[in-house]
Image (cartoon, helix red, strand yellow):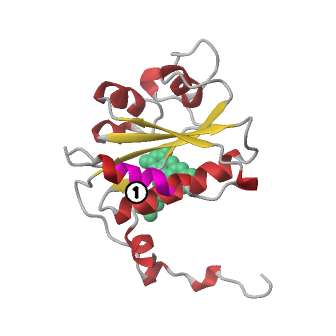
Amino acid sequence: MIEAIIRRRSHRSFEDRKVEPEKLDEILKAAMFAPTARDRRPVEFIVVQDRGMIARLSKMTPYSGFAKDAPAVIVICYDAERGGRFKEDCSISAAHIYLEATNQGLGACFVQLADAELGPELKGALPSAGGPEELIKKELAIPDRFRLQCMMPIGYPARALAQHDDSEFDRSRIHREKY
Ligand SMILES: Cc1cc2nc3c(=O)[nH]c(=O)nc-3n(C[C@H](O)[C@H](O)[C@H](O)COP(=O)(O)O)c2cc1C
């Protein structure tokens, strides 16, 4: 497991190559087997592979442009009527996606949606002061009760990124017994 943790990076450039459905299934399994508060299992996933919709998703925030070249995007959806720990449950699920993608030789990146601002091209696309969360819900026909913490573009990395190493293991951030 530590091997995948060391190799995991946020990948923002992807080869022009589809992700095998079996690999996506393993990634979704990892996401779905993540812990959730009170075991409510309120996290659902939309796998987007349509190029036009991926291009649209890539414009949703100022920091999602790279997603346009991803062959797949997983949108992490949270049924807020079923669960009560939106940020935590979604983020742990996203961490599992990162790690299983790495394990499968793929790369992914967390793209913040909740409380994020709309990308410059989509400013004013909503009548209200809504952000990417609201607009994506509309575009993907997601029921009102859902919240969106993030989306994860996934694909084969176009370039290798440095893996983590012990130089980042900063012992000054570790406190024993008391701060
Ligand atoms: C809560 C959170 C929000 C993030 N939002 C974005 C984002 O909107 N766009 C993006 O490109 N990367 C985003 N990232 C990825 C971080 O920039 C990345 O994890 C960080 O730079 C460390 O790099 P590494 O993941 O390669 O180790 C986010 C990561 C986290 C944990």
Q: From where the camera sits, is residue 12 visible?
A: no
State which quadrant residue 57 falls in.
top left
167 or 33: nearer the viewer: 33
Q: Secondary structure at mark 1?
A: loop
Instruction: Tell me if 119 is positioned left or right of 148 in this view.
Output: left
Question: Horizontal and vertical percent for residue 160?
Answer: 25, 63
Residue that mark 1 sits on: 10
Secondary structure mostly seen in the magenta stretch:
helix
> In the rendered structure, which segment of residues is drawn in magenta?
24-30
Give coordinates of residue 157: x percent, y percent.
27, 55
The extreme top residue here reads 127
Residue at (44%, 83%) from the top-left corner? 166
Mark 1 Cβ inside 8 Å of ligand 1? yes
For the N terminus, which image quadrant? bottom left
Q: Is residue 128 magenta?
A: no
The percent position of residue 24, horizontal first and vertical second, equals 37, 49
